[in-house]
Amino acid sequence: MLKSRVIPCLLLRGRGLYKTVRFKDPTYVGDPVNAVKIFNEKEVDELILLDIGATPEKREPNFDLIGDIASECFMPLTYGGGVTSIDQMRKLHRLGVEKIALNSAAYRDRRLVEESCSIFGSSSVIAAIDVKKTFLGKYEVWIDGGRTRTKEDPVAYTQQLARLGVGEIMINSIDRDGTMSGYDLELLKRVSKAVDTPLIACGGAGSLDHMCAAVAEAHVPALAAGSMFVFHGRHRAVLINYPNRSELEARLP
């Protein structure tokens, strides 16, 4: 059995799936329902779906579309984007969403994090943190899809969220997003040493080697990736893919 979880992370924009590079230049990669069906066939254990337009556009989740996606999803589904209330979280759970990722809302309303963990259980709540380096090399937390700088230190912020009871924390590197150049291992190591809450690495994965490095060097138990699972080859042709089980077991035992 794999100790490390390998999770496709899909970005929803409108009714389509897109992939970004450093949170910019979204490229259309297909229909979300079709992508989920392919991941079902490949026996993916878990899926993350993030609506990258909801929070910047100040709108709530597209419940009808999420319901269509969840009804076709035969694996645990995490959703994030535009979630700002307990009622919205209840509705998402009724649609079949197992875990909910809070990002900008978690920064603006710590009580929402604490209350959601109390009502739904810590295992149902993920705190998502987008991190970017300054020109001087300092890590800072950004919200609103990478549009708003908070000047918050990611290590201190992660510790705050851990104390509120979240079940997992997803650390996403804006600088590495879509580059397929590898995770920001220094960032992951700093956060991993600071909290006991399980981390999900995100941003930059382009190969199983990158995932192995995150496990070995930063002791991260879950590995999320986008481009790695939707592009193929140096010309980045769109192709939904996922390593087979024997390959994962051989590389990530």
Image: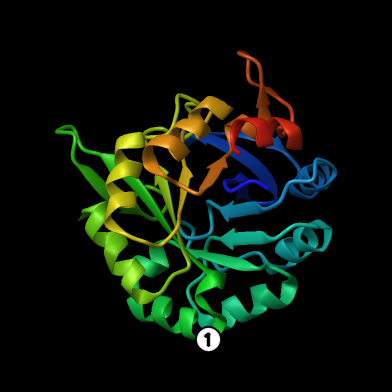
Kindly give the residue lying farthest to the top in the view shown.
Answer: 234
The residue positioned 22% from the left and 59% from the top of the image is: 156
Residue drawn 32% across and 43% down? 189
Q: Position of residue 46 (x, y in %)?
A: 67, 53
Residue 201 shows in this picture: yes
Which of 43/14 is in front?
Answer: 43
Q: Position of residue 167 (x, y in %)?
A: 48, 68
| Left or right: residue 44 compared with residue 167 | right
Name the amino acid type tagged 1: Ile
Quadrant position of the C terminus in the picture: top right
The residue sitting at 53% across, 59% down in the picture is 54
Foreground pick, 244 / 182 = 244
Q: Is residue 239 left or right of residue 90?
A: right
Colouring chosen for the image of the structure = rainbow
**Vertical order, 81 against 25 (above or below):** below
- Counting from the top left corner in percent of width and height, residue 215 is at 46, 39
Is residue 149 visible from the viewing direction of this image? Answer: no
Query: Disc 1 designates what residue?
Result: 119
Q: Nearer the viewer, residue 90 or 244?
A: 244
Q: Tell me the SS state at disc 1.
A: helix
Rendered position, 174 above or below 200: above
Name which quarter of the figure residue 250 lies in. Answer: top right
* Circle 1 residues within 10 Å: few <14, some 14–19, many ≥20: few
From the viewer's perspective, is residue 16 above or below residue 56? Answer: above
Measured as percent of width and height from the top left, residue 217 is found at 38, 36
Number of marks in picture:
1
- Reply above or below: 119 against 216: below
